[in-house]
């Protein structure tokens, strides 16, 4: 790879899980997330990167407070809005689905804004879109032109769901990058989608023969290698990828690892702030500087200096010689000694000349055979010395006593809120053997997740509304298709009878007059009456052509006889409402149009002659349709 200033080297700073607004009501830790995010932006400015890439969970809550939004916008204005030129180009059709904004273009191309540091971001599990309009806090920043929001999916109420992942095509010199984004989807649902053919469609560059594209995927999911049912496995991702940036997991595993047999690498930057007092969060926090030239890349991890110190240790009381199980004072003295040593360790490692932040301290105590002590009372001694005096101690049982409880293979005793065993809608419905045809189980699960985790009070209302709308659309389409099929079948039957007319026939013109009339339907008693009526109708036609009067109506009426109306459409009585009568006659217009389509033709030089049996069957069909 050439020197850093090469015109074809694309420089990207990658960070995930900033969790802005975390513990904003805690007097000691309320500014931690903002301090670290500002450091990330300053590192982007210092290293002169082309853009900043965020892998989800920019905010800790789906609906951040006004204070959190104001602090975030102030940081973005300070570092993103300047006159520094942008040296890369986006060539993809941004309005076609790669970017989720109303403008349909990247923010630095807007002439009304001066953007020197573009930011591309996907949503995570904390700040994902919810509600009827499927909006998130990232949409607010995108509308204000502070960042470019991509990777948003709208699965709708279609069962498992389908989505198309549209990349952002980026060019800098001779470097071509296809940036794919997939915001957080419930792990179980995405796992099913990735296993189902054509549920997730990946759009590829149209020109792939002459250009070597470097394909990057940014996603925010639970990563489980051994248990893919509770997360997403790397083996389910497409093989054409070159690098996968994995968000959601807070443990920093930033060095890219090759996935055996898949041909791509995975990097897991981890969170920039500790939101759980567990061992994986105690590791040093980093961001990733990614330099790409052609199809080669160079990763450089940069440590974050503004992160609050976090010390974590595990102790087993039964292994300590100077601790007496029957003497609580010895337990207190031993644990106080450990906390004091950890605080002193933080002071020694702090940079000289700067006031270190109060550290986070967590001691996991295995107390099998020993009595427990009050954690809050224990922490009162360290108010003003540690940032979490109320939860320094975590008491657990030994692994031997927990074997029969079928605990997780990770016997650390710690519980991450993201790994809790949660009840699902599928399990609840399977217990009752209910069959849901309109409300899909996956949609109900998503609504439950949004209601509980994102505090979305309209989650179930939105799910129900979308399901009802889709069901109505399907029923409307099915009804129209059924009507068209019935009309085609009737027309085909009429055509067949015209080609082979029977003995008992009536003129088509007279049949149309019966269908168009508001009077009661009639039929002919025998062949003579029909013949007489035919001659009378012909006479009326000749008189009408010569300007004759309407005297033929009485003569025609004499040749008719009313019959049982139950075989035909019921005639409306005088007491019936006009609208109800109109609805009962409405189906007649369907066959009327079909009959009229034949009236313009001739058969052997004469008007079409239809068998009486055909008209009878048609009217019976209409009568059944009305009922």
Image (cartoon, rainbow, N blue to C red):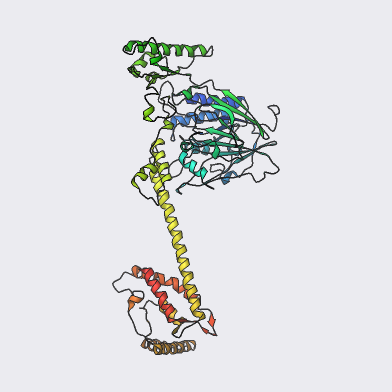
What residue is rendered at 40% in x and 75% in y? 619
Where in the figure is residue 557, as x and y percent of width and height? 37, 86
Where in the figure is residue 127, as x and y percent of width and height? 46, 35
Q: Quadrant of residue 486?
A: bottom left
Q: Quadrant of residue 534?
A: bottom left
| Pick the front one: 46 or 432 | 432
Where in the figure is residue 346, as x and y percent of width and height? 48, 14
What residue is rendered at 37% in x and 50% in y? 435
- Would residue 242 be found to the left or right of residue 466 on screen? right
Task: Tell me, yes or no, if residue 308 can be seen here.
Answer: yes
Q: How many marks?
A: 0
Task: Tell me, yes or no, if residue 148 can be seen here.
Answer: no
In the image, residue 78 above or below residue 465: above
Residue that extends furthest to the top in the rendered view of this protein? 322
- Would residue 393 be found to the left or right of residue 601 on screen? left
| Pick the front one: 317 or 221 | 317
Q: Quadrant of the C terminus?
A: bottom left
Where in the figure is residue 489, as x and y percent of width and height? 47, 70
In the image, residue 601 above or below residue 191: below
- Would residue 388 be found to the left or right of residue 52 on screen? left
In the image, residue 315 above or below residue 168: above
Q: Quadrant of the N terminus?
A: top right
């Amino acid at each position: 790879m050439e020197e850093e200033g090469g015109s074809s080297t694309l420089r990207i700073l990658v960070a995930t899980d900033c969790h802005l607004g975390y513990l904003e009501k805690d007097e000691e830790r309320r500014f931690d997330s903002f301090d670290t995010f500002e450091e990330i932006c300053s590192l982007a400015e210092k290293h002169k990167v082309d853009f900043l890439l965020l892998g989800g969970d920019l905010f800790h809550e789906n609906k951040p407070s006004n204070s959190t939004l104001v602090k975030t916008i102030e940081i973005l204005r300070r570092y993103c809005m300047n006159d520094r030129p942008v040296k890369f180009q986006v060539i993809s059709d941004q309005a076609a689905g790669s970017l989720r904004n109303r403008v349909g273009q990247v923010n630095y191309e807007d002439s009304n804004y001066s953007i020197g540091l573009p930011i591309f971001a996907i949503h995570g599990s904390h700040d994902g879109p919810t509600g009827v309009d499927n909006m998130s806090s990232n949409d607010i920043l995108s509308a204000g032109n502070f960042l470019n929001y991509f990777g948003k999916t709208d699965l709708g109420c279609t069962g498992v769901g389908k989505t198309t992942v549209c990349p952002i095509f980026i060019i800098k010199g001779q470097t071509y990058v296809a940036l794919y984004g997939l915001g957080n989807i419930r792990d179980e649902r995405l796992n099913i989608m990735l296993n189902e053919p054509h549920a997730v469609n990946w759009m590829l560059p149209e020109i792939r023969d002459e250009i070597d594209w470097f394909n990057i995927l940014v996603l925010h999911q639970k990563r489980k290698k051994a248990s893919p049912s509770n997360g997403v496995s790397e083996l389910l991702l497409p093989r054409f990828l070159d690098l996968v940036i994995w968000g959601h997991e807070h443990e920093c595993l930033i060095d890219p690892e090759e996935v055996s047999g898949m041909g791509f690498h995975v990097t897991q930057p981890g969170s920039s702030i500790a939101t759980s007092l567990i061992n994986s969060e105690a590791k040093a926090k980093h961001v990733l500087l990614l330099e790409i030239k052609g199809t080669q890349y160079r990763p450089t991890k940069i440590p974050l200096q503004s992160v609050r110190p976090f010390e974590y240790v595990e102790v087993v009381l039964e292994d300590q010689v100077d601790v007496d199980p029957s003497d609580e004072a010895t337990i207190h003295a031993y644990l106080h000694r450990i906390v004091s040593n950890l605080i002193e360790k933080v002071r020694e490692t702090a940079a000289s000349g700067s006031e270190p932040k109060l550290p986070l301290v967590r001691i996991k105590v295995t107390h099998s055979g020993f009595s427990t002590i009050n954690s809050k009372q224990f922490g009162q001694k360290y108010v003003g010395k540690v940032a979490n005096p109320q939860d320094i101690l975590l008491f657990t049982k030994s692994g031997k006593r927990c074997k029969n409880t079928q605990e997780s293979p990770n016997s650390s005793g710690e519980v991450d809120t993201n790994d809790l065993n949660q009840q699902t809608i599928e399990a609840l419905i399977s217990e009752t053997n209910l069959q849901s045809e309109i409300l899909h189980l996956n949609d109900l699960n998503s609504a439950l997740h949004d209601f509980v985790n994102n505090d979305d009070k309209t989650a179930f209302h939105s799910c129900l509304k979308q399901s009802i709308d889709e069901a109505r659309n399907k029923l409307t389409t099915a009804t129209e298709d059924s009507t068209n099929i019935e009309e085609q079948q009737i027309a085909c039957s009429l055509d067949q009878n015209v080609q082979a007319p029977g003995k008992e026939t009536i003129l088509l013109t007279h049949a149309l007059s019966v269908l168009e009339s508001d009077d009661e339907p009639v039929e002919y008693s025998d062949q003579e009456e029909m013949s007489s009526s035919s001659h009378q109708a012909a006479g009326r036609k000749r008189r009408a052509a010569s300007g004759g009067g309407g005297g033929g109506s009485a003569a025609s009426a004499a040749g008719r006889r009313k019959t049982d109306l139950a075989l035909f459409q019921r005639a409306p009585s005088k007491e019936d409402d006009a609208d109800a009568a109109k609805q009962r006659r409405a189906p007649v217009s369907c066959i009327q149009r079909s009959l009229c389509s034949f009236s313009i033709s001739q058969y052997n030089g004469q008007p079409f002659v239809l068998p009486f049996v055909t008209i009878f069957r048609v009217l019976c069909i209409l009568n059944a349709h009305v009922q």
